[in-house]
Amino acid sequence: MDLRAGSFPNLGSFLMTNSQAKRPRHGGCHCGAVRFAAILPDNVVALSCNCSICAKAGFIHVITPGADFRIMHGEDMLTEYRFNTGTAKHYFCRQCGVEAFNVPRSHPDDWSVNLRCFDADAGLLPRFQEFDGANWEAHVATINPELAPDGANDA
């Protein structure tokens, strides 16, 4: 599985001090075998989901554009798990079992990074938002309007 798309272009341009400026944030699994970087602003939405896997694992989603996420090392330590529709791709460290990130069903071109897996010095200021993932189909439009059922966005 090739999860990396290369290095970040113009990484230095993201190192501004404005709180809305994006800059690299790092993190990883518990044992450190898997490390990642995500380019994010200080202020992020952190989705607390009650679906069957997030509720049990304590995963808090920070959706990151696909182009702004990189696995820095440990790709060979990842194992993939899929359930239900098989759309979401959950990646776990084979050594410690931690899921630091996944490709979510709600945003298939992006990454969802577990807020709990960012390094302590990442400097993120999360705004928590509840998401009823247990009733995904009925509520997905609240986090991705593009996936609303046909006619749901009609005036």
Image: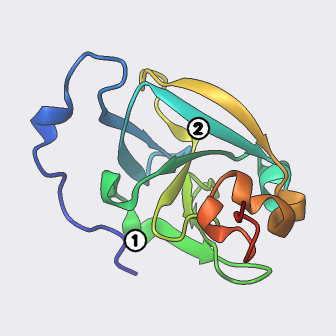
Q: Percent position (x, y) of residue 23?
A: 28, 32
The image quadrant that residue 138 belongs to is bottom right
Please state if 42 lies on the left or on the right of 18 as rendered: right
Name which residue lies at 59% across and 66% down: 146
Q: Is 154 or 60 nearer to us in this picture?
A: 154
Name which residue lies at 53% across and 71% down: 108
Q: Which comes sooner in the sequence, label 2 or label 1? A: 1
Mark 1 Cα-neighbour bin, 10 Å: few <14, some 14–19, many ≥20:
few
For residue 115, which numbered disc appears in the image? 2
Q: Percent position (x, y) of residue 153?
A: 70, 63
Mark 2 or mark 1, which is nearer to you?
A: 2
Three-letter code for the amino acid on which mark 2 is drawn: Leu
Mark 2 and mark 1: Cα distance apart in space = 22 Å
Q: Which part of the image, by quadrant, shows the C terminus?
A: bottom right
Three-letter code for the amino acid on which mark 1 is drawn: Asp
Q: Which part of the image, by quadrant, shows the N terminus?
A: bottom left
Please state if 124 lies on the left or on the right of 49 as rendered: left
Name which residue lies at 77% across and 53% down: 54
Does 93 appear above or below 57?
below
For residue 76, which numbered disc appears in the image? 1
Name which residue lies at 80% across and 80% down: 84
Kindly tell me whether residue 93 is visible in this rendering: no
Does 86 appear above or below 124?
below
Mark 2 Cα-neighbour bin, 10 Å: few <14, some 14–19, many ≥20:
many
